[in-house]
Amino acid sequence: MTLAGFLGAAYLFADSRGPAAAPAPASSPAAYHSDGLADAYDGFRAEALVLPTRRGPGTVSVRVTGPTGTATDFQHVHTKPMHMYVLRDDLSGYQHLHPAVVDGAWTAPVTIADGGAYRVYLEFVPHGRPAGADPTVLGIPFVIAGDTTMVPVPAPRAEARSGPYTVRRLDGTADLASGTPTALRFQVLRDGRPAVLEPYLGAYAHLSNFEVRTQGLRHLHPLPANATGDAPADGVLAFHAAFAERGDKRMFLQFRAGGTVHQVAFTVFTT
């Protein structure tokens, strides 16, 4: 079949109730956030050195340049100086990677399961930005040639499973109101009881949101579980959200339990 044109995918990242006790504010004190659909923003540019060209194991290697030249060091956010994401244009094949600097380029292994149009996202916070500032996100598209099995975006559902864990969206499949701050709440269960959650990258969960229609990228903030920053005893993960536009959102939730990182996905509609 003919490959679909690249639609892009906007990235939205939130971290739920991490071990740090201090609650995050409802809005960032400084906004630098970009949507990940361009390879340059705010004085930084991404240059692809190596991108996957076929199915199977491969490598992503991207050089980032900034106002002072090649950029190989950023603030550590959730224990890493950079977070990298890969997604196909039908909003499938999501991967959250942690690149290392190799010969001046941010490099990570990646495995591509099927053909199609993909995008790699690079998220980082340069040194000198105030605490809580939104990140810069750059993106580069790439294509894996050949027949492609496209995956329709699933309809909203209230539950998803990963291994022995069930994740429930506590408001079911209710639509959310765009332009209105709200809280997205998920509960992680094992055998019908709240799961024992473990820290993963400095938080108890991470949420990536791709806006299906506009591809817009926003940064969400966590709601604290308690004053001590301990794991939520009820297994509930809460995220502060304020969606600018109506439409479908595809969300990927990652959490760690039983020594393993698990991933589930939800579709959410905003009116």
Image (spheres, rainbow, N blue to C red):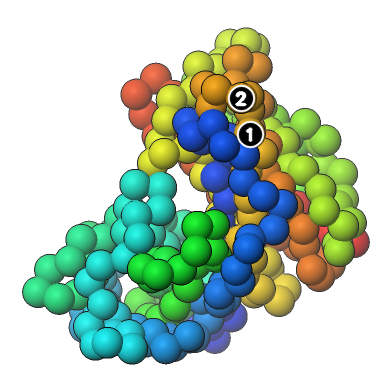
Q: Of residues 64 and 58, which is closer to you in this image? A: 64
| Position of residue 81 in the picture relative to residue 223 (left or right) | left
**In-front residue for pair 140/55:** 140
Q: Position of residue 48 (x, y in %)?
A: 28, 83
With respect to residue 253, does 7 lie above or below?
Answer: below
| Numbered circles on residues, count | 2
Quadrant assignment, res 244: bottom right
Residue at the spot of label 2: 227
Please say if 144 is above or below 24: below
Image height of 65 relative to 190, above or below: below
Measure the alpha-carbon separation of dots 1 and 2: 7 Å
Residue at 77% over, 31% down: 170
Tag 1–tag 2 contact (CB < 8 Å)? yes
- Horizontal and vertical percent position of residue 76: 34, 55
Circle 1 residue: 224
Q: Residue at x 60, y 68 (%)?
A: 30
Q: Say if residue 128 shows up in the picture.
A: yes
x and y percent of residue 103 in the render?
9, 74
Task: Assign a secondary structure to mark 2.
Answer: loop
In the rendered structure, find residue 6 and report the number of the disc placed on it.
Answer: none
